[in-house]
Image (tube, rainbow, N blue to C red):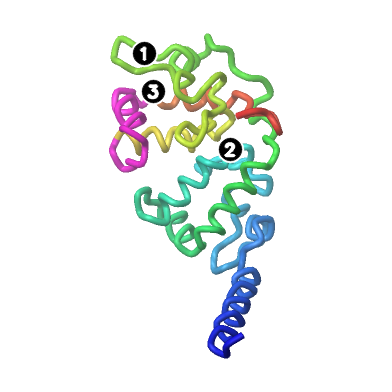
């Protein structure tokens, strides 16, 4: 082998090993942090269950999580906590974290029992408010609000504070990374009491079971 070709081959091998050595272990990053970012569990809970205004990541669609991390990294979605974290991770590491959390089992329900569809917020979530052009949440987010692919995340079992904060952000235009304004348009038509009631109702619903088709 010519000397120049040998040098190039050796460099490629060294770079490949260096990349593997620098790759982030998703479980370690989730628990303890690393790569210059804080542990995911410090905000999202030790099992990815979410808390307060921080969403549940466990059993969320991995394609949706990956898209959100890419949007945070590119600036398409802005958040003072998540934007710098996403930018600090490489694209492969962002994908690895999305796959890690997407594969975790769904956490225990936040409520002792799911609120019935007749409870406040239930009608809006399941049937909508067609008098003002607002479809039911489940018409896009799937049966039970458990999500459909990369565009429509699981919203069942999310903390009420997080759901309300996102609806408010969509309504004001502060969050704009929804495809074809599918969230901004209906959210802007909701009153604050409707946002609060539908958020509370969705938080009581069970997330997708571990291993369930989502």
In screen coordinates, is 175 left or right of 125?
left
Residue under the point 54% across and 64% down: 37
**Which is nearer the eye, 101 or 19?**
19
Is residue 183 one of those drawn in magenta?
yes
**Which is nearer the eye, 81 or 210?**
210
Residue under the point 63% across and 37% down: 59
Q: Which residues are magenta?
A: 172-193
Describe the element under mark 1 as helix, strand or loop. strand
Is residue 25 one of those drawn in magenta?
no
Observer able to see residue 197: no
Q: Which mark is residue 60?
A: 2
Residue 34: percent from left, percent from top? 61, 66
Observer able to see residue 21: yes
Please state which of the two labelled residues, at mark 2 or mark 1, is closer to the viewer. Answer: 2
Q: Residues within 10 Å of mark 2 (few under 14, many from 20)?
A: many
**Which is nearer the eye, 5 or 129?**
5
**Which is nearer the eye, 200 or 64?**
64
Q: Which mark is residue 51?
A: none
Q: Which residue is mark 3?
A: 193
């Amino acid at each position: 082998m010519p000397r120049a070709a040998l040098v190039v081959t050796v460099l490629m091998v060294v770079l490949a090993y260096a990349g593997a050595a620098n790759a982030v272990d998703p479980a370690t990053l989730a628990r303890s942090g690393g790569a210059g970012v804080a542990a995911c569990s410090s905000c999202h809970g030790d099992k990815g269950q979410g808390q307060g205004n921080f969403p549940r990541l466990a059993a969320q669609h991995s394609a949706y999580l990956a898209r959100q991390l890419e949007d945070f990294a590119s600036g398409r979605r802005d958040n003072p906590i998540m934007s710098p974290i996403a930018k600090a991770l490489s694209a492969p590491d962002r994908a690895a974290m999305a796959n890690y959390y997407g594969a975790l089992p769904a956490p225990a329900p936040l409520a002792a029992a799911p609120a019935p569809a007749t409870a406040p917020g239930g009608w809006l979530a399941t049937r909508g408010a067609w008098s003002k052009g607002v479809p039911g949440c489940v018409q896009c987010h799937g049966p039970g609000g458990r999500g459909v692919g990369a565009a429509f995340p699981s919203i069942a079992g999310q903390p009420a504070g997080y759901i309300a904060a996102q609806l408010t952000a969509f309504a004001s235009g502060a969050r704009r990374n929804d495809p074809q304004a599918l969230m901004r348009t209906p959210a802007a038509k909701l009153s604050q009491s409707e946002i609060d009631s539908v958020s509370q109702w969705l938080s009581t619903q069970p997330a997708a079971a571990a291993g369930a088709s989502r």
